Image (cartoon, rainbow, N blue to C red):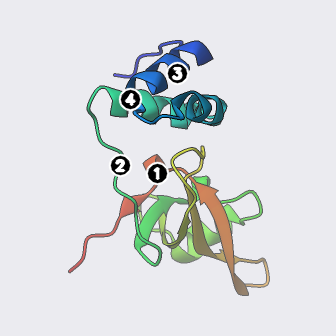
Amino acid sequence: MNISVNYEDSDVAKALESIIKHPNKDEFVKLLTPIICQSNHATTYFFKLLIGNELPAIIPSGTLCKIHVDNLGYSSNKDLIKDKFGDDDGKVVVTVKEFRGYHEYCEYQIEYTNVFPDDTTRKDSAYVSLKELELIEEF
């Protein structure tokens, strides 16, 4: 179950003040507060870390994953990709190209094979969220 909690930038600043132990702490707080606050993901992870949780593991570049075809990029030909490469659940195999950071809404850039009406294919990329990726188990 997810819950929604509203924090203000002053709450983030106070939390940073409590954890930064450096002579120039006030300047660090001024620098980091707006950086954390401009991303809901970063703010969520920040407060989760503050209460003792860990960040999700980063999926390394080159890792094969499955993703539902509907979560591919806007320029993807979803029906054609699903027909040619999709499994029974409408998922296709993709490759993780890059982890973009915990502050991004779409933390990963992936590579997939796009299909065109003339049945040609081309490697394409899209930005996706961690929750959309399913790791493929190794044999």
Say what amino acid the circle numbered 4 marks: Ile
- Circle 1 Cα neighbour tier, 10 Å, few/some/many (<14 / 14–19 / ≥20): some
Q: Is residue 13 above or below residue 88?
A: above
Identify the residue at horizontal 63%, vertical 58% (top origin). Answer: 127
Between marks 4 and 2, how big is the CA–CA gap? 21 Å
| Residue 79, percent from left and from top | 65, 63
Q: Nearer the viewer, residue 4 or 139?
A: 4
Residue named by callout 1: 130
Q: Is residue 37 in view?
A: no
**Sequence-first disc among 1 and 4:** 4
**Sequence-first disc among 2 and 3:** 3
Between marks 4 and 3, how big is the CA–CA gap? 11 Å
Residue named by callout 3: 12
Q: What is the secondary structure assignment of the residue under circle 3?
A: helix
Q: Quadrant of residue 103?
A: top right
Q: Nearer the viewer, residue 55 or 34?
A: 34
Residue named by callout 2: 56
Image quadrant where one finds the C terminus: bottom left
Q: Nearer the viewer, residue 87 or 27?
A: 27
- Circle 4 Cα neighbour tier, 10 Å, few/some/many (<14 / 14–19 / ≥20): few
Cβ–Cβ below 8 Å for labels 1 and 2?
yes
Identify the residue at horizontal 35%, vertical 28% (top origin). Answer: 50
Q: Is residue 106 above or below residue 66?
A: above
Labelled disc at residue 19: 4
